[in-house]
Amino acid sequence: MTDLTLDQAGKTKSALVSTSTLQKGVAFVVLIALLVFFSVFTENFAAWNNVVNIMQATAVNGVLGVAVTFVIISGGIDLAVGTMMTLTAVMAGIILTNLGMPLPLGILGAMASGAVMGAISGTAVAKLKIPPFIATLGMMQIARGLALVFSGTRPIYFNDTPNYGLISPESSLALLIPGLEIPNGVMIMFIVAIIASIILNRTLFGRYIFALGSNEEAARLSGVNVDFWKILTYALSGLICGIAGLIISSRLNSAQPALGLGYELDAIAAVVIGGTSLSGGRGTILGTIIGAFIMSVLTNGLRIMGVQEEWKIVVTGVIIIVAVFVDIMLRRRA
Amino acid sequence: MHNTSDTVPLISVEAIHKSFPGVKALVNARFDLRPGEVHALMGENGAGKSTLMKIMTGIYQPDAGEIHVGGQKVSLSDPRTAQALGISIIHQELFLMNHLTAAQNIYIGREPRKGFGMFVDEARMRADTAALFARMKVDLDPDVEVGTLTVARQQLVEIAKALSFNSRILIMDEPTSAINDKEVEHLFAIINDLKAHGVGIIYITHKMDEVKRIADRVTVMRDGQYIDTLPAVTTDMSKIISLMVGRELADATRATGQGGDVVLDVKNLNSGRAIRDVSFSLRKGEILGFAGLMGAGRTEVARAIFGADPIDSGEISIHGVTQAIRSPQDAVRLGLAYLSEDRKHYGLVTSMTVGDNVTMASWPRFTRSRFFMNDARMREAANDYVQKLRIKTPSVDQETRLLSGGNQQKIVISKWLLRDCDILIFDEPTRGIDIGAKAEIYKLLQSLADQGKAIIVISSELPEVLRLSHRILVMCEGRITGELMGRDATQESIMILATQR
């Protein structure tokens, strides 16, 4: 209440701001350091072809990372993003190839089916009070099983939809600016990230996501319809998985029903490396995108250096633990 | 037992001082316990009873003072040392592991071993536990999972655990707060048995009748100080209460009542054991005080009205219309606001800014097309309240957790005023707030009432209830035990109602 308290408060505040910027900063510095390291110590890393490869490899994990970032900031977790992605790809395949409907309907179908699956997870969490870990673990298996059932366990090819490649591997940007061949899938990731960032930071929905993750009970006692916003968060996560499903199936020119398991862990890893707190209430989309890039740069760079495939997995694991450790150290100092 | 002169006390503490940042918790406190006696320790909430017990069990270290156990000067540097000296405490909240058996709970961390210390000697543990229960004359199975027992029986397990340490000094913190009359009888029988074996018992309670029945002596504490020690049986109850309460209120600005229309009417509210047939009404412009001891059910009533917890039965009318309030969302829509004593958990999102918190209950109003946040308008509205309520913050962009308790409380109040709530329920409005800021919060509440808000104040601090309330309801064990007009009420009259079983 005194001026002294005020002074102290002011000081703590400035320390805090620099800390939260640092979190993102750390991930960014690590990314730059990796880029410099691999550029210097390998010949082909910085070649444009390879850069495109890296971006291409980041797109799916980046989009899934964005999906799960929303849920994690809201104080939950979504383990179903990988297999929901697969299921939405299968849905697109059924609509486009099996039913022969036009491309926009396929896109819509993939995103809508993702949103519905997400809403179901969200309802299980909000209304049935099932812990998010369990509810989405269940949804992970449900989506995986449904993808196999609907596809008859066989890949669905998009040969009848000639424009399907427009979604990911082709580059519309190269038509505008010759030479800048950034695949559309990568552009979609950036667009998704920008829109997600706006939703998270500029909208009522985003503000509720932070409030839920920081103190759900206080939000509830403030008269916030906590259940509704929670369900919406999971639904949004599912919808974004639908976008990831379109990107991956476009790149493979097929919906591969057996794919998907394990993608959720890579996505969560990207989120965590990007400085988003697994306990909720704190995090950024930019951090997640940086985190996704760190993972793909690492994989790509080590491959070029001739490091055995299995060791790359080990290194990724180490990076996750180190990133979280740095995060904890920074917060303890705050 | 009462030939006191030549008995060495089991434990005696003298001239104990203990300060926490900003608070003198104990000033020159003292206490002694003789073999085979029950010594009751009484005092209002915050009188320093628990701090003193924490010092006697090695949880806190005194700033100054001496502790003697069995005539020897000791230093209780940690709970383990206290336990080794035969001091045990049965907390009000029991500390048992629900999924373990009674025997496993009693010998946790010091299980008898066999097979070169590699295996737990379950048979011996079970036999030892059975022997303890036999000594206490209780019929309990050592193998029963503790979580399946009633609170009263869990308490017996805790007592057995204390005895297993060969404790001669047993501290019981409000042992009857969660058990029924029959179970109380059983507990008292065990206490009498322990007494006969020379165990000394420090008995913390708020209940006068229990003191009369079970205690030999009573020590009263107030504001962290030792007041007096008296024989329990021959001392008048009102004498003890007046010692607990102490000085008359040195405050002239007592509230005077006025009556507008009834805005909130509660009829026959029930919820389990916590709320029993509670009925009352609240008028526009009125401050209604809810007094009572901790656990009397006041917070439960507030949360039930607010839709935060489900009710078994009862009728709630707001502005004369019966309403079904199923969630806080419903309550807020009807103009109700609940300000919890635990602001950090239930009132604020402390990691968000002052502006976010002030506007939180009204966020949808600060949007463009109900989608994009209009942060400029939000900041403006928050700034308005920062000035009106004189919230001390560098800016509305400051994180809430960095502000003092008083300013945090003002933020919560702002939140509800901005939401146009006209029925405000304050639960311990000045808990954790320093004295200077308290007066400011009091003034704020009074001016809100003058502006026509209807206010409920739940408070364990009697001077606070007396100073603020136009009318006072006293609760005990889930029931309303009396109603007093603010100007007639005294601390004594409230305490008598609050300890009525």
Image (tube, coloured by chain):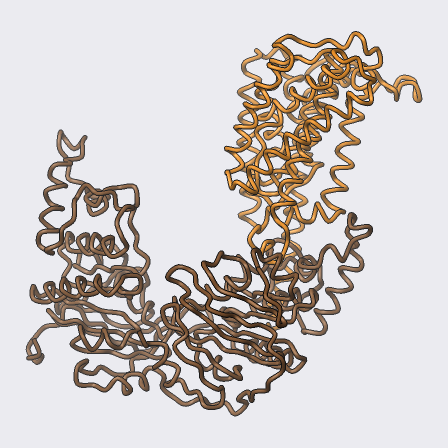
Chain colours: A orange, B brown
Please say if A91 is above or below B484: above
Please say if A135 is above or below B459: above
Question: B312 or B367: nearer the eye?
Answer: B312
**Residue A306, quarter of the rendered image:** top right
Image quarter hosting the N terminus of chain B: bottom left
Residue B65 in view:
yes
Question: A258 or B180: nearer the eye?
Answer: B180
- Most extreme residue toward the bottom is B252
Q: Position of residue B254 (x, y in %)?
A: 53, 89
Total numbered labels:
0
Q: Position of residue B126 (x, y in %)?
A: 13, 41
Image quarter hosting the C terminus of chain B: bottom left
Question: B42 or B207: nearer the eye?
Answer: B207
On the rendered structure, is B242 left or right of A288? Answer: left
**Residue B159, quarter of the rendered image:** bottom left
Please say if B47 is above or below A233: below
**Residue A113, quarter of the rendered image:** top right
Residue A290 in view:
no
Q: Position of residue B109 (x, y in %)?
A: 23, 43
Residue, x 93% and y 22% (percent of image)?
Answer: A176
On the rendered structure, is B43 left or right of B182? Answer: right
Question: A29 or A296: nearer the eye?
Answer: A296
Q: Position of residue B332 (x, y in %)?
A: 63, 61
